[in-house]
Image (tube, grey):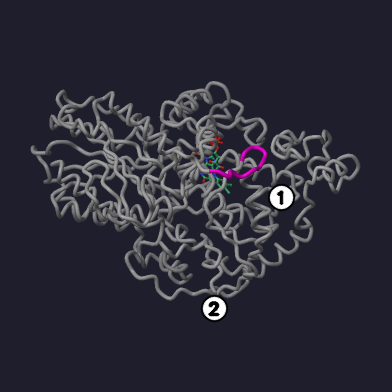
Amino acid sequence: MRPKRKASSRIPANAAAVYTDRAGHAPNKRSKLSKPAAKAFTKTTDTKSGNEDDAIVTQGRGGVEHQNEEVPNFDHSRPEEKVGIVDRRFYPAEMSNERCALYNANEIPRPMEILDATLASTKGAREKIGKGEAGEAVIHWFKRDLRIRDNTALSKASALAKEEGIGVIGVWVMSPQDWEAHLVSPAKCDFELRSVALLQKELAELDIPLYIETATPRKDVPTRLLALAKEWEVKHIFCNLEYEPDELRREERLVRLGAEQGINFETCHDDCVVPPGSLKTGAGRQFAVYSPWYRAWVAHLHTHPHLLDERPMPQKNPSGFRAKFKPFFDCEVPLAPDSKVLIDEQRDRFSRLWPAGETAALDRISRFMTEKIGRYTDTRNFPAKKSTASVSVHHAAGTLAARTSVRMARDVNSTKKLDGGIEGVKGWIGEVAWRDFYRHVLVNWPYVCMNKPFKFEYTNIEWEYDNEHFRAWTEGRTGYPIVDAAMRCLNSTAYMHNRLRMITASFLAKHLLLDWRLGEQYFITHLIDGDFASNNGGWGFSSSTGVDPQPYFRVFNPWLQSEKFDADGEFIREWVPELSGIESPAIHNPYEKGGEAEKIAKKEGYPRVIVEHKFARDRCLKRYKAGLGRETA
Ligand SMILES: Cc1cc2nc3c(=O)[nH]c(=O)nc-3n(C[C@H](O)[C@H](O)[C@H](O)COP(=O)(O)OP(=O)(O)OC[C@H]3O[C@@H](n4cnc5c(N)ncnc54)[C@H](O)[C@@H]3O)c2cc1C
């Protein structure tokens, strides 16, 4: 039986991100300078050699099982396709519950398991590669690790190069189709491009070139990388792993093809503090609940303290390397592809708000460590206090390693124990641990990356697909001031405070009963720190369909949340100018409270609530209960 969903009106959820200015106005002109460097779905030109190539980058975040196949049987009755949750340009139809269950029963190998098996079966062949004849250089392929310091794979690449008396070439590939398929926000693309430019400069100081290429279509990245290695007489390519299924499958292909062609493709765990798969319950399973997982995570780090050690800096390339590879030092950082372009004003705004690169990252985290971490537990839930580290953007782009963050926190603590000492430090480390947790979940339950909720039986919840409600939510016009302030902040800054992410996500899924995946998608297409695992985890938590979620009957009351976490209305006043004249607590709910607040709200044209709280709560409880009781699809 198909899950029953109402699809009353079409929601263009997959539309390109629109950022507003602080007053909530959308831009109306494009930058003259913003010419696309590459267009998705077209052949592109190799920026170095000038050769037109069919270089292809791989996959999207979860549809590789069907890669290269004709898209079969487009079913227009499926709401998830109608509203653009499943993008059929890149992905197969939504996975069935039966297939999810097969993953859970270990009947379908997980992408990480496939990669591990290929690493094991090619080990012998790979170990023989390049012994004493490692070629002209070692490649480090930069992906979501746009930094020099504390970078596991780069450090290993450099050590091998040193041993062999050769140098390191950095490679960065821009893949417009991957950005498209992964719904990466224009703000995040811009942040990455700015970071790449800074990385290129820092590498050059070590006489390491950063070779940059744009590759389309996306599924050819592996063959392109191997072709470059051959052309440059390179025998070893290093990279740090990303844990989404498509990336793992791409890397598996690289290991396999590389071994066949005499090139050792070396993958390293670096993105998590504790590598996924290291922690198991007593029964040998992956944890599905955070608290026991966190205890195991802490214990593992206490018994494996080297996991927090700083990786050695890469060495300067040998003399003569710069002259030999001179053209590689002059690679231009491409402009953003057409669909990801920001206008000049937005680029300036985001550059000011979110300085890119690892120096900015270290600067930001160092200030947090000296000024704020001690009071983190007491202050972290209050958006107006601006008391959190604001480093998620750096963790997401890899301009800062999560390992570096945890080590720095440990080193300012009064104890070396990660779960002891100063409350703020302990609490903050626990938050960084959530990031690891959601990655561990992703690796073990890869279908969460394929538009399926962790609790796939919840797909039977009958969602609303109300276009007007969705638009009101995205534009911050719901009539709930805290929700509207949060959404306007996101639209203007490409960031939202964690407490507000929980409030707005709960509001979308439970008050509006909109399919939570619409909200997940809106966030990822707008956030500068958009990160699949954390975003999916956060949405699963808030909509009660994910791993270790809020109980479904816990429906946040937006007014109470507002009174508690923005007590004097400072955050609301900052982002909802219509209400900025209200000084009293009535700012949280001006129409209900009446009096002067109501007059101001009316006069300034602030909207009335689009859904009554009590009605919404009752409807939510009924719908969730019914959805849970239903037969699964
Ligand atoms: C619905 C929803 C969507 C989210 N989407 C994303 C996302 O796309 N990208 C993202 O990085 N985070 C996401 N988060 C988690 C969290 O909101 C942000 O990481 C945090 O707000 C970033 O601000 P900060 O760096 O000041 O965090 P701090 O409070 O200073 O925390 C330090 C670091 O710990 C990590 N962290 C903190 N809280 C969480 C969490 N709940 N889950 C995972 N990691 C966490 C982040 O890397 C963060 O930088 C989401 C949360 C929710 C509820």
User: As rendered, which of 428 and 25 lies closer to the eye?
Assistant: 25
Give the labeled residue for mark 1: 477
What percent of the width, then of the height, locates residue 227? 19, 49
Q: Amino acid at mark 1?
A: Arg
Which residue is situated farthest in the bottom direction here? 1
Vertical placement of residue 378 versus 517, above or below? above
Which residue is pictured at 44% across the width and 38% down the height? Answer: 33
* Residue 488 magenta-highlighted: no
Q: Secondary structure at mark 2?
A: loop
Vertical placement of residue 282 versus 355, above or below? below
Which residue is pictured at 35% across the width and 37% down the height? Answer: 333
Q: Which mark is residue 548?
A: none
Q: Which mark is residue 1?
A: 2
Which residue is pictured at 15% across the width and 44% down the height? Answer: 231
Q: Quadrant of the N terminus?
A: bottom right
Callout 2 crowding tier (Cα within 10 Å): few <14, some 14–19, many ≥20? few
User: As rendered, which of 461 and 358 lies closer to the eye?
Assistant: 358
The reply to whether the C-beta atoms of the residues labelled 1 and 2 are less than 8 Å apart is no
* Residue 25 magenta-highlighted: yes
Q: Which residues are magenta?
A: 21-29
Q: What is the C-alpha distance between the residues marked 1 and 2?
A: 36 Å
